């Protein structure tokens, strides 16, 4: 091994000590070497000097795609708008429509509608161009300043999109009064009406063409037409711009519900005022037992009195068969309500007679219910000694006054 020499040619005794300097730590000779040069001392290599070029290349590799993206994206956006504009213009010309302006903001189209051209047709053509997200029409249809967003499953059309209309029926006609956007929509509504007219009805056509604000599709009223065609009499569905009013008569609850659903579908979000009525249910025929019930009950009461033991609510032995007969009469007509009225003689005071009469009425009601008469058909009231039917001066008269009477309640 050759000795290391300084610039004077003299050998150094210690690598860590320069001439004229005393140092206890090793000299950092790596800092004196050129960048990328290996400082091989005792067979070693300083790692930092080899890895720095690798880091620089990695940073460069990451930066290049970012720069390319920043340059290419604006160019591509411009290319997309130009392509959509050319294809949209070509699609309109293919249908014989020359428009003065077709502009794009990204994939949102803004199209000027020429005079005399149906805006709905222009919208359909432009919407059908591949890549178009939304369509805004100007000069032919009121449009907002911002593009119409692409429809989603949760979006709800605005109420103002549907003009005021009325659909009605009578026994002799079906009426449609509404503005429509084109003759095609007018004809489609007429075809729908023809399908539901039936025998003896004619179409009262009050539709008018309004290309800017009319109904865009016949389907808006088709479900209403089918629902209203059921049944007879007058009925209508009228929309005034805010409220859908259902009026007239329908044959049943199912038809009423169908018309309500059709109205809500025709004008989403509108207030539904349901004034439809149903026919009054026919009165059931009165059976013979019920028809004769009042007279039979009155005759029973005259023939079979129901009397009580003195001072009690217990029916005397002579009247027990009458209670059984009373139950049979009441069960012969189960729809008529009756009153059981309790009475007393005048041996007690009014303060005690009234409660006693009420107990007698309640006791007879309980027995009739036990024998099978519906409890909801029987009212029980006590009248004390107020309504005697015989003189209380005799024992027989007092027995007659200790009674309960059964009579038909008025208003059955």
Image (cartoon, helix red, strand yellow):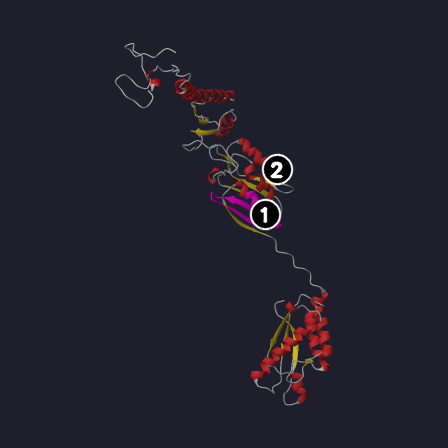
Residue at the spot of label 2: 194
Q: Is residue 290 left or right of residue 1?
A: right
Q: Give neighbour class at mark 2: few <14, some 14-19, many 20+ (Cα, 10 Å).
A: some
Quadrant in the picture for the C terminus: bottom right
Q: Is residue 294 magenta?
A: no
Q: Is residue 299 left or right of residue 243?
A: right
1 vs 2, front mark = 1
Examine the rendered structure and indicate whether residue 100 appears above or below residue 337.
above
- At mark 2, the secondary structure is helix
| Residue 265 rendering spot, x and y as whole percentages | 54, 41
- At mark 1, the secondary structure is helix
The numbered mark at residue 405 is: none
Rendering quarter of residue 388: bottom right
Examine the rendered structure and indicate whether residue 7 appears above or below residue 409.
above
Q: Looking at the image, which residue is at 63% across and 38% down?
A: 195
Judge by depth and name the residue closer to the eye, 37 or 190.
Answer: 37
Residue at the spot of label 1: 257
Q: Is residue 245 left or right of residue 385?
A: left
| Residue 51 rendering spot, x and y as whole percentages | 41, 19
Examine the rendered structure and indicate whether residue 257 appears above or below residue 43.
below
Part of the protein shown in magenta? 235-263
Quadrant in the picture for the N terminus: top left
Mark yes or no: residue 202 visible. Answer: yes
Are discs 1 and 2 less than 8 Å apart at CB? no
CA separation in Å, label 1 and label 2:
24 Å
Judge by depth and name the residue closer to the eye, 77 or 330.
Answer: 77
């Amino acid at each position: 091994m050759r000795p290391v020499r300084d610039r004077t040619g003299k050998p150094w005794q210690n690598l860590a000590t320069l001439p004229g300097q005393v140092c206890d730590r090793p000299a950092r000779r790596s800092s004196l070497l050129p960048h990328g040069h290996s400082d091989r001392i005792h067979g070693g290599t300083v790692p930092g000097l080899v890895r720095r070029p690798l880091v620089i290349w990695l940073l460069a590799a990451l930066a290049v795609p970012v720069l390319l993206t920043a340059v290419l994206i604006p160019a591509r956006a411009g290319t997309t708008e130009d392509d959509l504009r050319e294809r949209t213009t070509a699609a309109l010309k293919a249908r014989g429509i020359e428009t003065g302006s077709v502009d794009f903001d990204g994939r949102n189209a803004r199209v000027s509608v020429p005079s005399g051209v149906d805006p709905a047709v222009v919208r359909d053509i432009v919407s059908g161009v591949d890549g178009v997200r939304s369509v805004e029409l100007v000069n032919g249809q009121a449009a907002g300043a911002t593009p119409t967003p692409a429809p989603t499953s949760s979006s709800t059309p605005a109420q103002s999109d549907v003009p005021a209309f009325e659909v009605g029926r009578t026994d002799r006609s079906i009426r449609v009064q509404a503005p429509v956007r084109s003759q095609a929509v007018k004809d489609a509504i007429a075809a729908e009406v023809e399908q539901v007219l039936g025998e003896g009805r004619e179409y009262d056509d009050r539709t008018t063409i309004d290309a800017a604000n009319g109904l865009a599709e016949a389907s808006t009223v088709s479900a209403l037409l089918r629902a209203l065609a059921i049944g007879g009499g007058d009925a209508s569905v009228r929309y005034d711009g805010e409220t859908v009013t259902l009026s007239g008569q329908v044959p049943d609850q199912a038809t009423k519900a169908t018309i309500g659903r059709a109205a809500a579908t025709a004008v989403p979000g509108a207030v539904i005022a349901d004034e439809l009525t149903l026919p009054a249910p026919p009165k059931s025929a009165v059976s013979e037992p019920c028809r004769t019930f009042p007279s039979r009950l009155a005759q029973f009461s005259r023939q079979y009195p129901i009397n009580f033991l003195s001072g009690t609510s217990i029916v005397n032995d002579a009247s027990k068969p009458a209670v059984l007969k009373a139950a049979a009469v009441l069960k012969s007509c189960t729809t008529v309500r009756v009153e059981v009225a309790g009475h007393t003689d005048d041996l007690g005071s009014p303060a005690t007679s009234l409660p006693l009469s009420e107990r007698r009425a309640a006791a007879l009601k309980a027995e009739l219910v036990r024998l099978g008469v519906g409890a909801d058909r029987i009212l029980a009231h006590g009248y004390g000694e107020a309504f005697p039917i015989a003189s209380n001066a005799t024992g027989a008269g007092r027995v007659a006054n200790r009674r309960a009477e059964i009579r038909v309640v008025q208003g059955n």
